[in-house]
Amino acid sequence: MSAEQLAGLSDKFVVAAVLLYIIAMVGFAMELAFGRAVPGKAAVKRAARQPVTVGAPSDGDPSDGDAAPEAEAAVADPAPVMGGGARAGRIALVLAWIGWAANLGAIITRGLAVGRWPWGNMYEFVVAICLAAVTAFLFTQVRQNVRFLGAFVMIAATLGLGFAVKVLYTAAGPVVPALNSYWIAIHVTAAILASGLFTLAGVSGVLFLVRGDGLSRLPTRDDLERVAHRAIVLAFPLWTFAVIAGALWADRAWGRYWGWDPKEVWSFITWVAYAAYLHARVTAGWRGRAAMIVQLLAFGCLIFNLVGVNIFISGLHSYADVSG
């Protein structure tokens, strides 16, 4: 196939990925809508505090002393699982994997079309981050059931790809000489993988703040916080490596390790924000809402570093803006 044909195939793969992610999002949403409602921690504590007479029936209640276990079961499992919802979730997971394959195909064919690593501009970079976010979700699902995140990760991936196609699209072609280096495979790849994991943590953090203490179709806050923390623990070393590799690349390309370029500054600010989250958990024992707010502030720094700096602030990294 010619370079033009491969580039066109890459564009078609992106469209296919968007459509598959949208359908998968609907399936995951149906599973949430018709699945089991889960009590919050406050609801469980209220049920545990209710007085129960052991060994004697209450007035007008023919039951024996088994009232306490039954009350606890009613709180822990308040609604039956609807078969249609679970089936929709399983189908959505399959479609998410197919969409992931289309997303990957878009990146591979783009790379073959341009004859280089396919993340030399903002369009290619965002497409790769969407793949990384979905990859983080799907491979986490292999180890534990996190289908409850599916609808929200699919929303993020769909919006990201849509933004890339409508706003950031750059025709396949060569890049500036500064990007013709093996460092793009090292530095940018690490940043993409870390950004995908940070996105998974960000989605979990938003759901943590949205979820109430009562019955909810969402999982418990403990589960959401656990997913976010594990994703950040994996992503932080990758982001650290990306910052260091970026400094080494800058020395090779521009003759200095650090030059207060906006991209460099905000990459470091993002690193500091996530380091603050991890430090607060380890030393001060921060848990719950406070920790989630810190990590969401860090995620905001990441988004600004990706979108705001590259598009709205001029600097040595302006080669990665909308115009390519």
Image (spheres, rainbow, N blue to C red):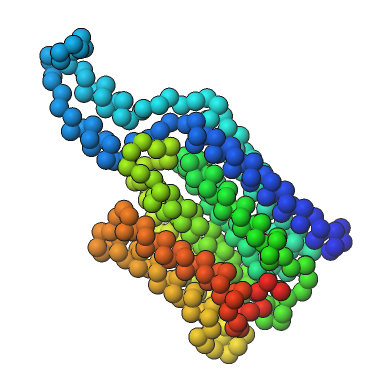
In the picture, measured across the screen, residue 180 lies left or right of residue 270, that is right
- In the rendered image, which quarter is residue 318 located in? bottom right
Q: Nearer the viewer, residue 97 or 255?
A: 97
Count every numbered label the image shows and give the total: 0
- Residue 253 on image: x %, y %: 62, 85
Q: Residue furthest right?
A: 2
Q: Nearer the viewer, residue 24 or 10?
A: 24
- Residue 258 on image: x %, y %: 50, 86
Q: Residue at x 49, y 70 (%)?
A: 241
Q: Residue at x 31, y 25 (%)?
A: 74
- Residue 272 on image: x %, y %: 40, 72
Above or below 209: residue 245: below
- Regarding residue 227, the answer to whether it shows in the image is no
Above or below 8: residue 220: above
Q: Residue furthest top?
A: 62
- Regarding residue 164, the answer to whether it shows in the image is yes
- In the rendered image, which quarter is residue 263 located in? bottom right
Q: Residue furthest bottom?
A: 255
In the picture, measured across the screen, residue 319 lies left or right of residue 247, that is right
In the picture, measured across the screen, residue 42 lies left or right of residue 216, that is left
Q: Residue at x 65, y 60 (%)?
A: 163
- Residue 291 on image: x %, y %: 33, 59
Q: Quadrant of the C terminus?
A: bottom right
Q: Nearer the viewer, residue 253 or 175?
A: 175
- In the rendered image, which quarter is residue 38 located in? top left
Q: Residue at x 44, y 74 (%)?
A: 269
Q: Quadrant of the N terminus?
A: bottom right
Above or below 317: residue 168: above
